Image (spheres, rainbow, N blue to C red):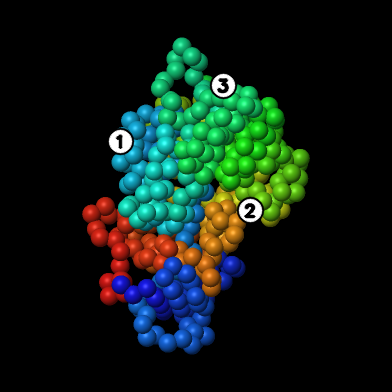
Amino acid sequence: MNKKKILTNLNLFSGNDDKLISDATIVIDENIICYSGPSKDFNGSLNNFEVFDLKGKTVIPGMTESHAHISYTNNGPLELDKTPVEEAMIKTVDNARIMLGSGFTSAISFGSIHRIDVFLRDAINSGRILGPRLLAGGRDICAIGGNADTYPDYAKPQTEGLAMITDGPWEIRKAVRTLWKNGVDVVKVMIDGELISLQGRPGDLGYKDEEVEALVDEAHRKKMKVACHARSAEAVKQAVKSGIDFIGHANYIDNEALDLLIENKDRVFVGPGIAWEIAFLENAEKMGYSKDSREVDAYKAEVESTIVSYKRMKKEGIRILVGGDYGLDIAPHGTYAKDLEHYVNLFGFTNAEALHSATRFGGQAMDPEGSLGTIEEGKLADLVIVDGNPLEDITILQDHGRIDMVMKDGLMYKGLMNNKSPYLVDSDKS
Ligand SMILES: [Zn+2]
């Protein structure tokens, strides 16, 4: 197969602005983009290129799922660790292929069952299995009684694959070192809780400041990133002040939290992880919660507050990422692009802004050095070929039939949603 590829006759959304360039060309040498723009401005020779005629399809940058749990196996929200690790590993291999096939060429893990992510990342990087570029997570770090330790001791289900329950700065440093030793890229910490939990709700901070500061210091010393679950304003403040990189949820922003985010907007990323909450409200009765239950009322109010918070953050230019805790029965793997629709419908994003969250900002979160997230000269060749125009209809990204091909690292794949097809394509089969 030729190492140089040229993609022509396409509509280009580069991710740098909200424009669509019609009749565009993209040139790729091995895994690097060396031209992207109007076809008429490309003067190079077509000799020695493998040519893909995309027949008017749209090309967008590969998307980043920034709150990923690839090892979650579509269980209920309170049964994340129910699947035996052996079965979870096999399912994770499928989930990774499905994520890539859904147009997500990168993923930031917000926590992995057991040590699955690390083995997954290494298998993807070595080419043994298909999946997105992955910043691998580990077990969540959580205080006693925190969001991954919500059952009283007498009623505790087995959940040791999900979290490291640990307290005190030095014990927390040891937990971080253990994750580092085992190859983790992103440390996930539970800052506050969850409405559905038996104990520890949003606003109940598990750790004192010095504990979270120790965690972040230790992680950054080891060149790892830190992601957190932080719903309340107080939780977000603790997260930003201690230097956490990726803030998950941030549903109840107050002025002080907003000011802190603004001060730190060049280094911090925020994402609501809203998809499963919306799915919970849609499926509450099936899940055994009546329409007027405390949980349904509370999540409704949380979604309302999230809408207000994200409109404020967007206005201030805080970088908001796409990623929604997918991998649950009510929000299964493969439905990741639902996030973009939610951002448009709930937070008032334009379609282009939702795409920027999924592409440019996601790329910046994955690699601050800037190798990912847009289609331009010098970037890594991660692309999604879409049948249709997502600037006109953002929901088409949810339709796997409209994700015609996915390129990751210069290799073009087709048919990734079917676990029996050969995936790699050359120009003859495009
Ligand atoms: Zn999560």
Which residue is denoted by mark 1 in the rendering? 87
Check contact, mark 2 vs mark 1: CB within 8 A: no
Tell me where residue 71 sits by quadrant.
Answer: top left
Which residue is denoted by mark 2 in the rendering? 319
Of labels 2 and 1, earlier in sequence is: 1
Please give the name of the residue rendered at 34% of the width and 37% of the height, measured from the top-left corner.
88
Q: Around disc 3, counting alpha carbons within 10 Å, would you say few (fewer than 14), some (14 to 19), or many (20 or more)?
A: some
Question: In the image, is residue 55 above or below residue 105?
Answer: below
Tell me where residue 3 sits by quadrant.
Answer: bottom left
Can you give x and y, in whole percent of width and height, for residue 234 in the image? 69, 33
Q: Is residue 108 visible?
A: yes
Q: Which residue reaches farthest left?
A: 420
Question: In the image, is residue 60 above or below residue 420?
Answer: below
Q: CA distance from mark 3 to mark 2?
A: 32 Å
Decide if ligand 1 comes within 8 Å of the CB at mark 1.
Answer: no
Q: Amino acid at mark 2?
A: Arg
Can you give x and y, in whole percent of width and height, for residue 367 in the image? 56, 56
Please give the name of the residue rendered at 68% of the width and 34% of the height, measured from the top-left corner.
213
Given residues 429 and 389, the one toward you in this image is 429
Name the image quarter holding the N terminus. bottom left
Q: Amino acid at mark 3?
A: Ile
Which residue is denoted by mark 3 in the rendering? 144
Check contact, mark 3 vs mark 1: CB within 8 A: no
Q: CA distance from mark 2 to mark 1?
A: 36 Å
Can you give x and y, in whole percent of width and height, for residue 182 in the image? 46, 38
Question: In the image, is residue 193 above or below residue 422?
Answer: above
Q: Is residue 147 visible?
A: no
